[in-house]
Image (cartoon, rainbow, N blue to C red):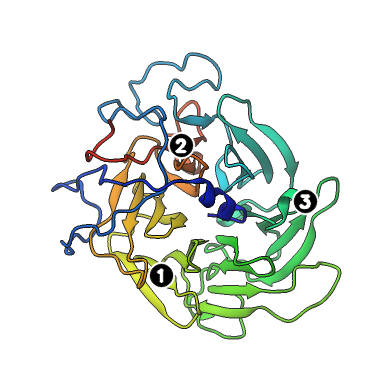
């Protein structure tokens, strides 16, 4: 979750999350060697919302699907916004009923909410080639008062973090993050009111990810956020990042990081003291981990190539995962990217189907993913 997610989390109530997708032979995408039951079961909150019919066909890339009922109108009640360009970051706004979503290639930042036409809030000049562009968003911890927005973007010369204020041009916060022919993904989240976490990709150079003099392939702690003043250099919290996925935090102070390496995709955890860094889960089949959202006891991870939302139950003390992730909405909305948790406990995600051939007529979209409260399926 991003920025004001802490206030959203306080608005959610505890509910039991049951496995929504059974990993059966031929469908499993994970190493399911762990067999210990989930304990405790994860919870993102509960809400009486429209369930997804598990027997319904996918609504994104089905060749035989009939035409939509109208331009940019989706019959799926859990679709929040349609007809976007391929999405970048996704962040909930205060109150948790609407969100800002970036379009990676255009640099547009759109406000989206259920039942409303997406509205362009602002636009940032970006270079959308080589997988770069407008890659992530984070709200100032005091967004309700200052209206400040932070963005991870690609330019023609580098990747950087900029601060955006209404009616003003973006101001540089951190520049000089290496830009490559690939590996330009990056992510943001706030860790307290004065520290911004910046996850950088390796820019296509695994050696840069382990080079202490390079900003590539790192999780950085940035404590100087005022563009008008030079401050201390960012400190490195984690190195050796491959293709950056996302960074998210939970109410207990844990930091969660997803990234993709040549060997595997992985979810890592840094404890609240910043002293213990541990791999929590790895995916040898590399389903393309992307956005993450976390609460105490659970982490949701978007799978781009896996076309699903993975939910992992975590031990609140150690962060350990004792069983294979559950998969939600597998193959229903296509390739998922950004992730956030709304006030009603649903997971919101942006799609990136226009990045590849076969996008549906209403792609790209922002969708909400109901988390079942029990019964092992969508009731």
Q: Which residue is mark 3?
A: 145
Secondary-structure class at tag 1:
strand
Q: Upstream in the sequence, badge 3 or badge 1?
A: 3
Residue 79 sits above or below residue 110 on the image: above
Q: Is residue 216 visible?
A: no
Left-right relation of 32 to 369 = left
Secondary-structure class at tag 3:
helix
Q: Position of residue 362 (x, y in %)?
A: 50, 27
**Gap in Å between the C-alphas at discs 3 and 1?**
33 Å
In depth, the one of 305 and 373 nearer the eye is 373
Q: Is residue 174 visible?
A: yes
Q: Which residue is mark 1?
A: 268
Please tell me whether mark 3 or mark 2 is closer to you in this view.
Answer: 3
In depth, the one of 345 and 56 nearer the eye is 345
Q: CB under 8 Å between callouts 3 and 1?
A: no
**Gap in Å between the C-alphas at discs 3 and 2?**
27 Å
Left-right relation of 117 to 38 = right
Q: Which residue is drawn at the image coordinates 29% and 25% (left, top)? A: 56
Residue 86 sits above or below residue 135 on the image: above
Q: Which residue is mark 2?
A: 368
Q: Upstream in the sequence, badge 3 or badge 2?
A: 3
For the view shown, which residue lies furthest in the top direction?
Answer: 69
């Amino acid at each position: 979750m991003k920025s004001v997610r802490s206030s959203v989390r306080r608005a959610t109530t505890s509910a039991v999350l049951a496995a929504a997708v059974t990993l059966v032979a031929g469908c499993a995408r994970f190493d399911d060697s762990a067999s210990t039951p989930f304990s405790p079961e994860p919870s993102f909150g509960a809400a009486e919302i429209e369930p997804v019919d598990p027997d319904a066909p996918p609504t994104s890339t089905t060749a035989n699907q009939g035409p939509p009922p109208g331009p940019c109108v989706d019959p799926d009640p859990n679709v929040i916004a349609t007809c976007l360009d391929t999405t970048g970051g996704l962040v909930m706004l205060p109150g948790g009923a609407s969100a800002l979503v970036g379009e990676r290639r255009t640099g547009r930042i759109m406000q989206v909410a259920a039942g409303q036409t997406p509205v362009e809030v602002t636009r940032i000049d970006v270079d959308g080639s080589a997988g770069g562009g407008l890659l992530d968003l984070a709200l100032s911890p005091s967004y309700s008062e200052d209206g400040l927005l932070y963005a991870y973007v690609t330019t023609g010369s580098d990747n950087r973090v900029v601060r955006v204020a209404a009616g003003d041009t973006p101001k540089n916060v951190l520049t000089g993050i290496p830009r490559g022919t690939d590996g330009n993904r990056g992510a943001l989240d706030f860790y307290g009111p004065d520290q911004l976490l910046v996850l950088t990709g390796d820019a296509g150079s695994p050696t840069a990810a382990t080079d202490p003099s390079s900003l590539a392939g790192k999780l950085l702690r940035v404590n100087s956020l005022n563009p008008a003043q030079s401050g201390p250099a960012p400190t490195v919290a984690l190195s050796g990042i491959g293709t950056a996925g996302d960074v998210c935090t939970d109410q207990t102070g844990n930091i969660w990081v997803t990234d993709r390496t040549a060997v595997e995709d992985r979810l890592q955890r840094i404890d609240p003291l910043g002293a213990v860094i541990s791999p929590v889960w790895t995916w040898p089949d590399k389903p393309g981990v992307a956005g993450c959202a976390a609460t105490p006891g659970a982490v949701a991870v978007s799978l781009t190539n896996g076309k699903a939302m993975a939910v992992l139950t975590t031990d609140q003390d150690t962060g350990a995962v004792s069983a294979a992730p559950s998969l939600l909405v597998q193959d229903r909305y296509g390739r998922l990217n950004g992730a956030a948790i709304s006030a009603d406990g649903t997971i919101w995600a942006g799609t990136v189907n226009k990045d590849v051939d076969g996008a549906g007529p209403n792609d790209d979209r922002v969708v909400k993913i109901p988390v079942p409260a029990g019964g092992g399926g969508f009731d």
